[in-house]
Amino acid sequence: MLSETGVSPKPSLPRLTVDGLHKQFLLHGQGGLEIDVMRDLSLTLHAGECLVLAGRSGIGKSTLLKMLYGDYRIDQGWIRLHFDDGELDLETLPAYAWHGLRRDVIGYVSQFLRVVPRVAAVDVVMEPLLARGADENEARQRAETLLARLNLPERLWRLPPGTFSGGEQQRVNIARGFIGEHPLLLLDEPTASLDAANRDVVIALIHEAKARGTAMLGIFHDEDVRERVADRLLPLDGSLGSPAATSQSFRESLS
Ligand SMILES: Nc1ncnc2c1ncn2[C@@H]1O[C@H](COP(=O)(O)OP(=O)(O)OP(=O)(O)O)[C@@H](O)[C@H]1O
């Protein structure tokens, strides 16, 4: 919940810091057209906190999550993860290290499930645990518990999710994203295709993750969901303004 000042009531260790981040897309197919998406973005995210990205469509919210997940290159600026025993700079991370980072540290619930043909829903969900060497029976049990909580009918668990409805696919995606209990979780519209009952389940999962110390950075267009999960809001609208206006607006939202 947001406190009156918009400040998290429980200050804790920073898990992630972003400093002076820039992003520009160069469209080679369009005669080298350059699109500036982000300029001088800075933020701090703490353990056990959910920071929600706000701002108009196309402002760069998903782009920021993709940069944090290694899908998009970091052109300029710093993204730093903080651990008990040190720090890790993502802008200099070699490509081979991203696999382990995604397995153990950064989880991501995207808007759409990337379906693998012929892989059953329950196997899609338990895969992040198996990748870490978890016991198969235990992983399956945890996957089934999550799918049941998310009200996915049991008859669908053994089927590949390619033909599932949008909301069913999204629930498989959510279960897969939450099962790994990563210390940092990126949430790109996880409730977009869900009905009210399942939105409530996702909100409960987010609160449980906070209690475990998970740091979350999320995009939620639904204002009610945003109100119920956000400890702070980070408006991105200033990020292509003048540098002075930008840093002030971010300082205000972070203070
Ligand atoms: N791979 C890409 N190549 C070129 N342009 C891109 C690419 N990815 C994103 N963009 C552009 O960057 C801008 C920001 O996109 P992004 O998806 O981050 O916006 P958003 O704030 O998440 O929007 P929405 O709320 O509508 O999901 C958009 O103008 C988009 O067209």
Image: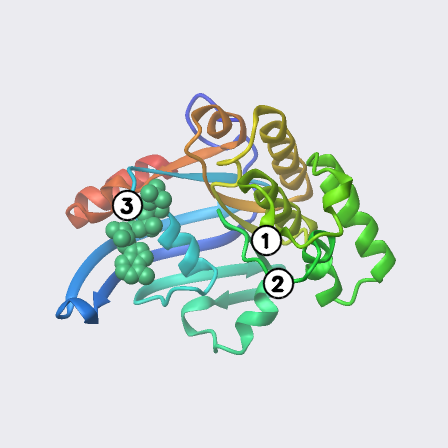
Q: Dot 3, crowdedness within 10 Å: few (<14), some or many (≥20)?
A: few
Picture quarter with the C terminus: top left
Disc 3 and disc 2: Cα gap in Å? Answer: 31 Å
Which residue is at a point 77% across and 41% down the rendered structure image? Answer: 154
Q: Are marks 3 and 2 in contact (CB under 8 Å)?
A: no
The residue lying furthest to the front in this view is 163
The residue at which mark 2 appears reads as: 117
Q: Is residue 142 left or right of residue 114?
A: right
Residue 162 - label? 1
Which residue is at a point 48% across and 77% down the rendered structure image? Answer: 95
- Residue 120 image position (x, y, % from top left): 71, 56
The residue lying furthest to the right in this view is 137
Q: Are marks 1 and 2 in contact (CB under 8 Å)?
A: yes
Local SS, label 3: loop
Q: Amino acid at mark 2?
A: Pro
Q: Is residue 54 above or below residue 107?
A: above
